[in-house]
Image (cartoon, helix red, strand yellow):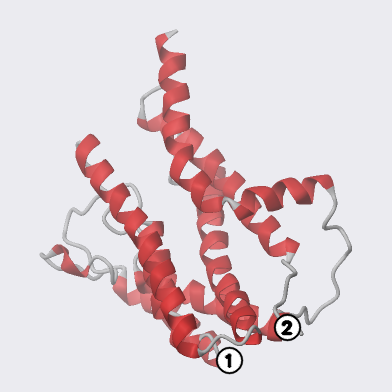
Amino acid sequence: MDTIPRERFFEVDAFRGIAILLMVTYHFFFDLDFLGIHEFNMHSGILLVTGRSAAILFIFLVGVSLTLSYSKASLSGKDKKAILIHNLKRGAGIFGWGLVITVVTATFLERGTIYFGILHLIGVSIILAYPFLRYRKLNLVLGLFFLSAHIFMDSAYADIPWLLWLGIKPHGFYTLDYFPLVPWFGLVLLGIFAGNSLYPDYRRSFRMCNCGENAVVRVLGYLGKRSLLIYLVHQPVIVGILFLFISI
Protein backbone atom coordinates (compact mmCIF):
# COMPACT_ATOMS: atom_id res chain seq x y z
CA MET A 1 0.00 0.00 0.00
CA ASP A 2 1.34 3.46 -0.96
CA THR A 3 1.59 5.58 2.19
CA ILE A 4 3.54 8.46 0.64
CA PRO A 5 1.55 11.72 0.99
CA ARG A 6 0.86 13.29 -2.39
CA GLU A 7 -0.90 16.49 -1.39
CA ARG A 8 0.82 19.86 -1.49
CA PHE A 9 -0.55 22.51 0.81
CA PHE A 10 -1.50 25.23 -1.64
CA GLU A 11 -1.53 27.94 1.03
CA VAL A 12 2.19 27.43 1.74
CA ASP A 13 3.06 27.77 -1.95
CA ALA A 14 0.75 30.77 -2.25
CA PHE A 15 2.35 32.58 0.69
CA ARG A 16 5.77 31.90 -0.83
CA GLY A 17 4.42 33.38 -4.08
CA ILE A 18 3.39 36.50 -2.18
CA ALA A 19 6.93 36.73 -0.81
CA ILE A 20 8.26 36.48 -4.38
CA LEU A 21 6.06 39.36 -5.55
CA LEU A 22 7.11 41.51 -2.60
CA MET A 23 10.78 40.71 -3.26
CA VAL A 24 10.61 41.52 -6.98
CA THR A 25 8.76 44.77 -6.23
CA TYR A 26 11.34 45.80 -3.64
CA HIS A 27 14.30 44.96 -5.88
CA PHE A 28 12.77 46.86 -8.82
CA PHE A 29 12.72 50.08 -6.79
CA PHE A 30 16.10 49.24 -5.23
CA ASP A 31 17.65 48.91 -8.70
CA LEU A 32 16.11 52.19 -9.83
CA ASP A 33 17.77 53.87 -6.86
CA PHE A 34 21.07 51.94 -7.05
CA LEU A 35 21.53 52.67 -10.76
CA GLY A 36 20.76 56.35 -10.25
CA ILE A 37 17.65 56.31 -12.44
CA HIS A 38 15.39 57.63 -9.70
CA GLU A 39 16.11 58.26 -6.04
CA PHE A 40 14.11 56.36 -3.43
CA ASN A 41 14.51 56.04 0.31
CA MET A 42 14.96 52.29 0.71
CA HIS A 43 15.50 52.46 4.48
CA SER A 44 12.11 53.67 5.66
CA GLY A 45 8.44 53.74 4.77
CA ILE A 46 6.59 51.36 2.49
CA LEU A 47 9.70 50.19 0.63
CA LEU A 48 11.43 49.11 3.83
CA VAL A 49 8.25 47.32 4.93
CA THR A 50 7.99 45.61 1.53
CA GLY A 51 11.57 44.36 1.59
CA ARG A 52 11.47 43.18 5.19
CA SER A 53 8.07 41.52 4.73
CA ALA A 54 9.41 39.53 1.78
CA ALA A 55 12.45 38.37 3.77
CA ILE A 56 10.48 37.52 6.92
CA LEU A 57 7.90 35.53 4.97
CA PHE A 58 10.55 33.67 2.97
CA ILE A 59 12.62 32.69 5.99
CA PHE A 60 9.62 31.76 8.14
CA LEU A 61 8.32 29.51 5.35
CA VAL A 62 11.70 27.77 5.20
CA GLY A 63 10.96 26.42 8.67
CA VAL A 64 7.40 25.47 7.79
CA SER A 65 8.52 23.71 4.61
CA LEU A 66 11.24 21.79 6.48
CA THR A 67 8.63 20.29 8.80
CA LEU A 68 6.45 19.28 5.84
CA SER A 69 9.40 17.69 4.08
CA TYR A 70 10.43 15.87 7.26
CA SER A 71 6.91 14.59 7.96
CA LYS A 72 6.43 13.47 4.38
CA ALA A 73 9.76 11.63 4.32
CA SER A 74 9.06 9.97 7.67
CA LEU A 75 5.60 8.80 6.59
CA SER A 76 7.07 7.38 3.38
CA GLY A 77 9.37 5.15 5.42
CA LYS A 78 12.69 6.93 4.96
CA ASP A 79 15.10 6.50 7.84
CA LYS A 80 16.70 9.40 9.69
CA LYS A 81 20.03 8.98 7.92
CA ALA A 82 18.42 9.33 4.49
CA ILE A 83 16.51 12.42 5.62
CA LEU A 84 19.70 13.94 7.05
CA ILE A 85 21.63 13.29 3.83
CA HIS A 86 18.80 14.86 1.81
CA ASN A 87 18.89 17.98 4.01
CA LEU A 88 22.68 18.18 3.79
CA LYS A 89 22.56 18.03 -0.02
CA ARG A 90 19.69 20.50 -0.24
CA GLY A 91 21.27 22.95 2.18
CA ALA A 92 24.68 22.70 0.51
CA GLY A 93 23.10 23.28 -2.89
CA ILE A 94 21.33 26.47 -1.83
CA PHE A 95 24.44 27.67 0.03
CA GLY A 96 26.39 27.00 -3.18
CA TRP A 97 24.09 29.37 -5.06
CA GLY A 98 24.78 31.90 -2.33
CA LEU A 99 28.50 31.53 -3.02
CA VAL A 100 27.82 32.16 -6.71
CA ILE A 101 26.15 35.43 -5.74
CA THR A 102 29.17 36.26 -3.56
CA VAL A 103 31.52 35.76 -6.52
CA VAL A 104 29.29 37.74 -8.91
CA THR A 105 28.86 40.70 -6.56
CA ALA A 106 32.57 40.71 -5.69
CA THR A 107 33.41 40.74 -9.40
CA PHE A 108 30.98 43.34 -10.70
CA LEU A 109 30.37 45.70 -7.76
CA GLU A 110 32.83 48.24 -6.43
CA ARG A 111 31.45 47.72 -2.92
CA GLY A 112 28.62 45.91 -1.24
CA THR A 113 29.73 42.32 -1.88
CA ILE A 114 27.19 39.85 -0.50
CA TYR A 115 29.08 37.58 1.89
CA PHE A 116 26.18 36.11 3.83
CA GLY A 117 22.89 36.92 2.17
CA ILE A 118 19.53 35.21 2.31
CA LEU A 119 20.60 32.17 0.25
CA HIS A 120 23.62 31.60 2.49
CA LEU A 121 21.30 31.78 5.49
CA ILE A 122 18.72 29.40 4.03
CA GLY A 123 21.37 26.87 3.02
CA VAL A 124 23.01 26.83 6.45
CA SER A 125 19.63 26.86 8.22
CA ILE A 126 18.40 23.77 6.36
CA ILE A 127 21.43 21.88 7.68
CA LEU A 128 21.39 23.29 11.22
CA ALA A 129 17.63 22.83 11.61
CA TYR A 130 17.66 19.04 11.16
CA PRO A 131 18.02 18.15 14.89
CA PHE A 132 15.05 20.38 15.75
CA LEU A 133 12.54 19.13 13.19
CA ARG A 134 10.95 16.62 15.58
CA TYR A 135 10.19 19.23 18.23
CA ARG A 136 7.56 21.89 18.63
CA LYS A 137 7.76 23.98 21.82
CA LEU A 138 11.56 23.80 21.92
CA ASN A 139 11.67 25.69 18.62
CA LEU A 140 9.42 28.40 20.01
CA VAL A 141 11.80 28.95 22.94
CA LEU A 142 14.97 28.82 20.83
CA GLY A 143 13.44 30.96 18.10
CA LEU A 144 12.56 33.71 20.56
CA PHE A 145 16.04 33.40 22.07
CA PHE A 146 17.72 33.99 18.69
CA LEU A 147 15.47 36.95 17.96
CA SER A 148 16.13 38.44 21.40
CA ALA A 149 19.88 37.91 21.06
CA HIS A 150 19.86 40.40 18.19
CA ILE A 151 19.42 43.17 20.75
CA PHE A 152 22.93 42.47 22.00
CA MET A 153 24.52 41.24 18.76
CA ASP A 154 23.48 44.28 16.73
CA SER A 155 26.15 46.34 18.45
CA ALA A 156 28.78 43.59 18.37
CA TYR A 157 31.82 44.29 16.18
CA ALA A 158 35.10 42.53 15.48
CA ASP A 159 38.01 43.47 13.24
CA ILE A 160 37.86 40.12 11.43
CA PRO A 161 35.26 39.08 8.82
CA TRP A 162 35.04 35.42 9.85
CA LEU A 163 32.14 35.96 12.25
CA LEU A 164 29.84 37.64 9.73
CA TRP A 165 27.72 34.48 9.49
CA LEU A 166 26.94 34.80 13.19
CA GLY A 167 26.08 38.49 13.11
CA ILE A 168 29.34 40.04 14.33
CA LYS A 169 30.53 42.62 11.81
CA PRO A 170 33.78 44.52 11.24
CA HIS A 171 33.55 48.29 11.72
CA GLY A 172 32.43 50.01 8.53
CA PHE A 173 31.02 46.79 7.07
CA TYR A 174 28.75 47.38 4.07
CA THR A 175 26.87 44.83 2.00
CA LEU A 176 23.79 44.82 -0.20
CA ASP A 177 22.28 41.76 1.48
CA TYR A 178 22.98 40.50 4.99
CA PHE A 179 21.09 37.80 6.90
CA PRO A 180 23.25 36.38 9.72
CA LEU A 181 22.13 33.47 11.89
CA VAL A 182 21.43 35.91 14.72
CA PRO A 183 18.60 36.80 14.55
CA TRP A 184 17.34 35.18 11.33
CA PHE A 185 17.79 31.51 12.24
CA GLY A 186 15.31 32.25 15.01
CA LEU A 187 12.68 32.92 12.38
CA VAL A 188 13.38 29.52 10.80
CA LEU A 189 12.90 27.90 14.21
CA LEU A 190 9.60 29.74 14.66
CA GLY A 191 8.59 28.43 11.25
CA ILE A 192 9.38 24.90 12.43
CA PHE A 193 7.25 25.49 15.51
CA ALA A 194 4.39 26.74 13.33
CA GLY A 195 4.78 23.88 10.84
CA ASN A 196 4.68 21.22 13.55
CA SER A 197 1.70 22.94 15.16
CA LEU A 198 -0.34 23.53 12.00
CA TYR A 199 0.65 20.45 9.96
CA PRO A 200 1.35 17.57 12.37
CA ASP A 201 2.01 14.29 10.53
CA TYR A 202 1.55 16.11 7.21
CA ARG A 203 -2.08 17.00 7.95
CA ARG A 204 -3.76 20.33 8.52
CA SER A 205 -4.80 20.88 12.12
CA PHE A 206 -7.15 23.67 11.02
CA ARG A 207 -9.96 24.21 8.57
CA MET A 208 -9.03 25.66 5.20
CA CYS A 209 -11.16 27.04 2.38
CA ASN A 210 -11.37 24.93 -0.74
CA CYS A 211 -9.73 27.65 -2.83
CA GLY A 212 -6.74 25.84 -4.27
CA GLU A 213 -8.22 26.15 -7.77
CA ASN A 214 -8.78 29.88 -7.49
CA ALA A 215 -6.94 31.63 -10.35
CA VAL A 216 -5.06 34.04 -8.09
CA VAL A 217 -4.08 31.29 -5.66
CA ARG A 218 -2.87 29.11 -8.54
CA VAL A 219 -0.69 31.91 -9.92
CA LEU A 220 0.77 32.58 -6.48
CA GLY A 221 1.34 28.86 -5.99
CA TYR A 222 3.08 28.61 -9.37
CA LEU A 223 5.44 31.41 -8.36
CA GLY A 224 5.98 29.86 -4.94
CA LYS A 225 6.98 26.49 -6.38
CA ARG A 226 9.65 28.19 -8.49
CA SER A 227 10.90 30.62 -5.87
CA LEU A 228 14.59 29.68 -6.11
CA LEU A 229 14.68 30.01 -9.89
CA ILE A 230 12.87 33.35 -9.76
CA TYR A 231 15.21 34.58 -7.04
CA LEU A 232 18.26 33.72 -9.14
CA VAL A 233 17.08 35.27 -12.41
CA HIS A 234 14.92 38.23 -11.42
CA GLN A 235 17.75 40.67 -10.69
CA PRO A 236 19.58 40.16 -14.02
CA VAL A 237 16.22 40.50 -15.79
CA ILE A 238 15.29 43.71 -13.95
CA VAL A 239 18.74 45.25 -14.45
CA GLY A 240 18.74 44.27 -18.13
CA ILE A 241 15.33 45.87 -18.69
CA LEU A 242 16.41 49.06 -16.89
CA PHE A 243 19.63 49.33 -18.91
CA LEU A 244 17.58 48.83 -22.07
CA PHE A 245 15.24 51.60 -20.90
CA ILE A 246 18.19 53.92 -20.20
CA SER A 247 19.70 53.33 -23.64
CA ILE A 248 16.51 54.19 -25.54
Q: Residue furthest top?
A: 248
Q: For the residue labelled by badge 1, is the local secondary structure a helix, a strand or a loop?
A: helix
Please give the name of the residue rendered at 24% of the width and 50% of the height, measured from the top-left corner: 174
Residue 153 picture quarter: bottom left
Is residue 127 depicted above or below 100 in this figure?
below
Q: Which residue is mark 1?
A: 137
Are circles 1 and 2 on residues that touch, CB within 8 Å? no
Residue that label 2 marks: 3
* Residue pictured at 44% horizontal, 37% vertical: 235
Q: Relative to 160, say whether 230 is above or below.
A: above
Using residue 60 as the reference point, say whether residue 212 is left or right of it.
Answer: right
Q: Residue furthest front?
A: 1
Task: Report the mark closest to the observer, 1 or 2.
Answer: 2
- Up the image or down, 209 lies above or below 1; here it is above
Per the rendering, the mark at residue 165 is none
Nearest the viewer among 179 and 45 is 179
Please rate how many residues cluster around mark 2, counting C-alpha atoms within 10 Å: few if below 14, some from 14 to 19, many from 20: few
Quadrant of the image containing the C terminus: top left
Side (left or right) of 76 relative to 180: right
Residue 175 percent across, percent down from the top left: 28, 49
Q: Tag 2, which secondary structure?
A: loop
What's the residue type where badge 1 is placed? Answer: Lys
